[in-house]
Image: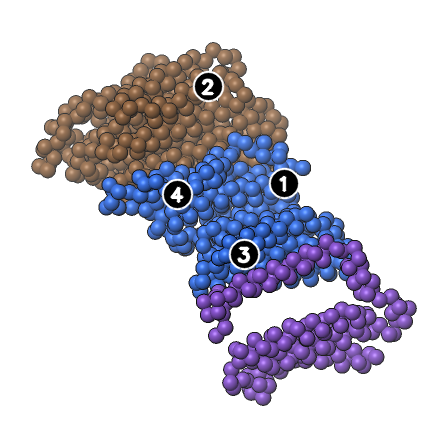
């Protein structure tokens, strides 16, 4: 199980490097997908299946599609990829930086936080996030109403900002 | 106290509801009545020294002369400004007199405050009307620069003063002038205490102004309209001296050594600013530098803290207030006729304005401290006490007196004697308003010869 | 803008601040702040001008960063201490992070650089909302978390008073000057917060009054740079006469209202044995005073030549409502004698 955690965290870092190093939105989005997926994996193995499920569904299913769509709108015809020299350079620098920082802090967190939930059998019975979700729906009714209102307001704001096509405040190219 | 303060406040409605035709006579009469009423403060029959005591204000032998001087100056300022504002719209004239009145209001509150912090607030409050008078009614564009200098020099000194006063409040628990001299002496030994000492005094030394931090004064004087110059020279500078006299009792053990550099600066300033006067071409600037020079003497007298020094300082402050204000008025009569402050363009005025020459003569003599004028009394007391403090000071103060005589003579000769330049032959004759104005300046000065103990302060 | 939408947005603006005020739970507080941010963005961009769009975008980015940081910090707090209550912050790490997040939200230096540029892109009414109403909710939170370690707030405070004074010195645009003035005032509030929170409230209150009247004066004159101010005498002579007092009150000159918070703050600092800090802060106020003085020079103390003396606009009837301005400007000038009453009102 520890090896799976290694793998997940390694890919998470790699995804972050991919996002940070690449100037083109296409490939950054690809890196983002990688980061989100790996993050969900880490969450699951720490015992948070509900959260990671939500994250996976909403983030990857909804937001990232919109992001990919808008990135496609603003995309350039000849994007820079990992093959080109400046990108490779920054990838190297980031990886070196990660290795450096990892090397410095290695001793500190290795024992404490890399343990996945299956190795602590007595705690894995208690799924805190499940109970929390139920709590939110049962006693946090007021908060739910406000959240709904915020979502509605966000819709209004976005509509107001983009209203009027090319005369709107924010517009497509 | 309120007998003076409320009529001063009521001047404001008087100014704004009087018909335009009667504006100047009415305000003059009103303010003059206030000034006459204020004389009642001079009779101090209290045993504790404090008179007309109420919750926040009181007068004593130290503040009374300055209070009366303040009240006396307002009618004179109104008299002096009548001509140069006559071209302006009536509302602006009313505004101008309102500003002068507010200045008197704040000054009365400052001099009569029994809490040091109230004195501080009013000390700062006088900045705003003065700033507006200088920058709104001055003549040249340099007035804005002068206003900035005036405000920032004063504030840079007085903000540390506020902190120092608040610290004093925390240490002694009181800032009341009535009780602070009886509070336990504070233990002052660390470096921080020395900085605190400087913080308490520097604001007043800037306001005096001490040589070295005096640059704002000539600028402000030169650019201000006549009323601004008068009140600045006569009363506002005295706020600094008054504040120092009040603070000295608290600062006791430290002043003895720490005041050396300031005394030296003050005395050196007498010589330096006097020498600057000797080669000055600008009449108002000359009078302004002469103020700095006299105020150096006052600062020296206060800083050595002997009874004679204090008394001399108070006498010199009052006498110099009247004298320099008179000189500014005289300079203004020239300025209103020739529209220039340059002395070389207005020579030989004796030929055209002979009676004015008499006033110039008396005012110049008062400036160089002719016996038996109070100016001499003050200078003599300060010089004597300084001599007692250290023999070497006589070299500086003596030379200073000589230079004072020199530039007073230079000013008199330059403006009054000699041939008259051709371009001012068709000059307007002097008005009786102007004669009255100068007369009202010099009359108290002459009468004070007869009863000088009115301005002797604590020692009487 | 459609009046219905405008109503909804203004309502949401009020609701956001109210939710933050009444919340004791970090999630609610965060939500209120987000509602606030969202609701003002369409107001910012209602004039379709590149500057205002830029301002809206910058504002959104800064506020979203601050809100995310706040959320992160409150989650960290819940993780570390098991508490979601605002009043029960016990761990220094989330407290400091929340302080910094709120500092970014209100624009305390060194997290201030969005504020002048955002304010410059707005019209005066929205600018007024931004620099008064939008400060309330973050301050309500700042006042509740009572930080254990005053160093952060003191550093933020000093930097803000310094940057606020320095930044405004060479500006000619009124809205930028007001932004820097806001930074400097917020610095004073942050400085006293660890020692005497009631004084922060007092300073905030006086700042709100003074800023309200300054914005209203500029709005009345339709002035956005210093040069436009110079002809204000021909529009509103009496306001022109009062404005130097208002500006000097912003600068904190006695005996005007602006001196009151400064006086009390300095007093409290000396009581806390911090006289050096007090002196330094007092002297940084001089920097701000310089540009207020410059504004009053160009507005009132010099007279701009105008060849239309006979038909100056102040002779004509105007439609603008003057009651709020009249009330606020008289409060912004002459509130100092009421200082004891105000302190009694604000001290718990």
| B333 lies above or below C144 | above
**Residue C259 spot, x, y in % from top left:** 51, 38
- Determine whether label 2 and label 4 are within 8 Å by CB: no
**Residue A129 spot, x, y in % from top left:** 80, 65
**How far apart in space, not on screen, are marks 1 and 4 (Cα)?**
39 Å
Residue at label 4? C319
Residue at label 2? B2
- Determine whether label 2 and label 3 are within 8 Å by CB: no
Q: Is residue B381 left or right of residue B404?
A: right
Identify the subunit bearing mark 3: C
The chain whose colour is blue is C
Q: Is residue C40 left or right of residue B426?
A: right
Identify the subunit bearing mark 1: C
Of labels 2 and 1, the one closer to you: 1
Chain A shown in which color?
purple
Q: Is residue A28 left or right of residue C244?
A: right
- Determine whether label 2 and label 1 are within 8 Å by CB: no
Residue C310, disc: none
Specify whether residue C66 is in view.
no
**How far apart in space, not on screen, are marks 4 and 3 (Cα)?**
25 Å
Residue C198, disc: 1
Q: Is residue B207 left or right of residue C20?
A: left
Secondary element at tag 3: helix
Q: Outermost residue toward the bottom?
A: A83
């Amino acid at each position: 199980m520890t090896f799976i955690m290694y793998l997940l965290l390694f890919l998470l870092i790699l995804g972050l490097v991919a996002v940070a190093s690449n100037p083109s939105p296409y490939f950054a989005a690809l890196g983002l997908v990688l980061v989100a997926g790996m993050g969900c994996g880490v969450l699951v193995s720490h015992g948070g299946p509900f959260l990671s499920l939500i994250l996976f569904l909403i983030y990857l299913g909804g937001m990232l599609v919109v992001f990919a769509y808008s990135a496609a709108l603003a995309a350039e015809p000849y994007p820079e990829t990992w093959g080109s020299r400046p990108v490779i350079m920054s990838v190297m620098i980031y990886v070196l930086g990660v290795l450096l920082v990892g090397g410095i802090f290695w001793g500190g967190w290795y024992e404490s936080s890399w343990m996945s939930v299956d190795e602590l059998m007595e705690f894995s019975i208690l799924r805190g996030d499940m109970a929390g979700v139920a709590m939110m729906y049962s006693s946090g009714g007021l908060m739910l109403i406000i959240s709904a209102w915020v979502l509605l307001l966000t819709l209004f704001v976005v509509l107001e900002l983009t209203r009027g096509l090319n005369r709107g405040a924010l517009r497509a190219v | 106290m309120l007998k003076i303060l409320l009529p001063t406040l009521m001047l404001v409605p008087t100014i704004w509801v009087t018909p335009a035709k009667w504006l100047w006579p009415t305000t003059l009469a009103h303010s003059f009545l206030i000034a006459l009423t204020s004389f009642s403060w001079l009779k101090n029959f209290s045993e504790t020294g404090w008179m007309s005591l109420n919750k926040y204000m009181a007068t004593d032998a130290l503040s009374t002369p300055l209070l009366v001087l303040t009240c006396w100056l307002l009618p004179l300022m109104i008299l002096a400004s009548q001509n140069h504002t006559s071209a302006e719209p009536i509302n602006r004239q009313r505004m101008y007199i309102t500003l002068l009145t507010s200045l008197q209001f704040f000054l009365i509150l400052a001099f009569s405050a029994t809490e040091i912090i109230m004195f501080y607030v009013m000390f700062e409050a006088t900045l705003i009307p003065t700033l507006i008078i200088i920058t709104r009614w001055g003549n040249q564009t340099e007035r804005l620069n002068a206003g900035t200098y005036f405000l920032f020099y004063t504030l840079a000194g007085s903000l540390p003063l506020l902190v120092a006063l608040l610290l004093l409040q925390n240490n002694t628990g009181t800032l009341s002038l009535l009780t602070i001299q009886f509070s336990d002496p504070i233990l002052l030994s660390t470096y921080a205490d020395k900085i605190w000492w400087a913080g308490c005094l520097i604001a007043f030394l800037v306001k005096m102004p001490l040589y070295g931090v005096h640059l704002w004064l000539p600028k402000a004087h030169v650019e201000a309209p006549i009323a601004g110059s008068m009140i600045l020279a006569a009363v506002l500078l005295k706020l600094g001296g008054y504040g120092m006299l009040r603070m000295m009792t608290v600062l006791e053990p430290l002043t003895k050594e720490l005041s050396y550099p300031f005394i030296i600066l003050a005395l050196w300033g007498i010589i330096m600013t006097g020498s600057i006067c000797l080669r000055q071409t600008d009449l108002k600037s000359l009078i302004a530098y002469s103020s700095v020079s006299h105020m150096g003497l006052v600062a020296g007298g206060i800083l050595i803290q002997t009874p004679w020094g204090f008394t001399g300082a108070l006498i010199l402050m009052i006498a110099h207030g009247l004298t320099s204000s008179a000189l500014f008025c005289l300079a203004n009569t020239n300025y209103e006729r020739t529209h220039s402050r340059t002395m070389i363009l207005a020579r030989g005025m004796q030929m055209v304005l002979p009676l004015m020459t008499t006033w110039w003569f008396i005012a110049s003599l008062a400036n160089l401290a002719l016996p038996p004028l109070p100016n001499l009394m003050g200078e003599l007391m300060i010089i004597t006490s300084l001599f007692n403090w250290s023999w070497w000071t006589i070299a500086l103060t003596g030379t200073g007196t000589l230079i004072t005589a020199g530039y007073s003579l230079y000013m008199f000769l330059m403006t009054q004697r000699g041939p008259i330049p051709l371009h001012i032959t068709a000059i307007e004759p002097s008005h009786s308003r102007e004669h009255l104005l100068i007369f009202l300046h010099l009359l108290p000065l002459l009468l004070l010869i007869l009863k000088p103990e009115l301005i002797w302060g604590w020692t009487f | 803008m459609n009046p219905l939408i405008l109503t909804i947005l203004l309502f949401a603006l009020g609701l956001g601040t109210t939710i933050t005020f009444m919340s004791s739970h970090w999630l609610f507080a965060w939500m209120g702040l987000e509602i606030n941010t969202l609701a003002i963005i369409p107001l910012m961009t209602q004039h379709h001008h590149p500057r205002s769009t830029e301002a809206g975008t910058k504002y959104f980015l800064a506020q979203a960063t601050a809100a995310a940081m706040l959320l992160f910090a409150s989650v960290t707090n819940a993780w570390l201490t098991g508490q979601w209550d605002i009043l029960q912050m016990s761990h220094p790490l989330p407290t400091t992070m929340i302080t910094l997040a709120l500092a970014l939200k209100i624009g305390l230096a060194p997290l201030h650089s969005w504020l002048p540029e955002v304010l410059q892109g707005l019209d005066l009414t929205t600018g007024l909302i931004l620099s008064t109403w939008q400060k309330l909710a973050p301050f309500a939170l700042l006042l509740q978390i009572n930080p254990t370690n005053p160093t952060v707030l003191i550093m933020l405070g000093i930097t803000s008073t310094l940057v606020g004074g320095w930044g405004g010195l060479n500006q000619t645009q009124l809205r930028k000057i007001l932004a820097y003035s806001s930074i400097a005032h917020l610095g004073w509030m942050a400085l006293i917060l660890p020692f005497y929170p009631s004084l922060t409230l007092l300073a905030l209150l006086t700042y709100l009054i003074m800023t309200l009247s300054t914005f209203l004066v500029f709005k009345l004159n339709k002035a956005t740079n210093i040069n436009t101010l110079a002809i204000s005498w021909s529009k509103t002579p009496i306001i022109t006469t009062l404005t130097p007092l208002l500006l000097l009150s912003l600068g904190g000159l006695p005996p005007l209202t602006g001196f009151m918070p400064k006086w009390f703050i300095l007093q409290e600092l000396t009581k806390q044995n911090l006289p050096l800090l007090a002196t330094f802060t007092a002297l940084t106020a001089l920097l701000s005073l310089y540009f207020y003085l410059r504004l009053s020079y160009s507005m009132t103390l010099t007279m701009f030549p105008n060849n239309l003396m006979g038909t100056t606009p102040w002779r004509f009837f105007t439609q603008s409502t003057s009651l709020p301005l009249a009330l606020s400007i008289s409060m912004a000038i002459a509130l100092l004698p009421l200082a004891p009453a105000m302190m009694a009102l604000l001290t718990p």
